[in-house]
Amino acid sequence: MDHSLTLETRDGLPDALRVLLQDFPRETWPEHNNFAGLVAFWLDRHLMFRRLMGALIDDAEQAVDRKIDARTHAAKLSRYGSMLLQNLHGHHQIEDHHYFPILATREPVLNKGFELLDSDHHAMDGLLNRFADGANAVIQGKSEAGVFREELLSFQSMLNRHLIDEEELVVPVILKHGPGGLG
């Protein structure tokens, strides 16, 4: 894969993978007939991931500023961190094994994009493992919240890059072809 397209280095999808986005701009998605149901649910999942990341970062900042004690931070980190990890793993498995293969057959010109998203998921496995290790170190009192906060900010940046690119590739395909066979 082109190094400029890795999750760590890219700043968006290449124009060749944004062809349907021109026909289905993001601001028009909610009004489209194929938005309700699967697309709305799927985007809500992405919103949940973003909110969990925000809560984790906010809690780490509060712990650094001593606005919450280490015990409270550990409990919240355990709860929200587990929720993020479990839901992201499950979400990626469904996409890799079900959604992406079906969507790639509907728009073969975008196959490279689905391969890119699959590659992101593999890169994110390492990020999720690092996240889990960092969270466990904080929970066990072996690491400071400030160190973990920096890790969270880096993870948030890559997660958001992936989510935006995934939305801009997947949603237009579903809007164009409908959700049939994906639900």
Image: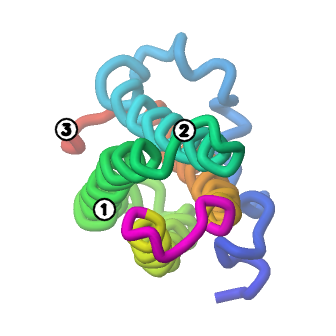
Q: CA distance from mark 3 to mark 2?
A: 42 Å
Say which label, 2 or 1, has the lower sequence index: 2
Quarter of the figure with residue 172: top right
Residue at which label 2 appears: 68
Real-space CA distance between mark 2 and mark 1, rounded to the nearest whole angstrom: 29 Å
Farthest residue toward the top? 31
Q: Whole-percent x and y of residue 102?
A: 30, 57
Residue type highlighted by circle 3: Gly
Q: Which residues are magenta?
A: 139-147
2 or 1: mark nearer the eye = 2
Where residue 183 is drawn, which disc sits there? 3
Q: Tell which circle, 1 or 3, labels the residue nearer the N-terminal end.
A: 1
The amino acid marked with disc number 1 is His
Q: Earlier in the sequence, mark 3 or mark 2?
A: 2
Whether pointer 1 and pointer 3 mark residues with C-beta atoms closer than 8 Å, the reply is: no
- Residue name at image x 74 percent, y 87 percent: 3
Q: In this picture, is 61 found above or below 148?
A: above
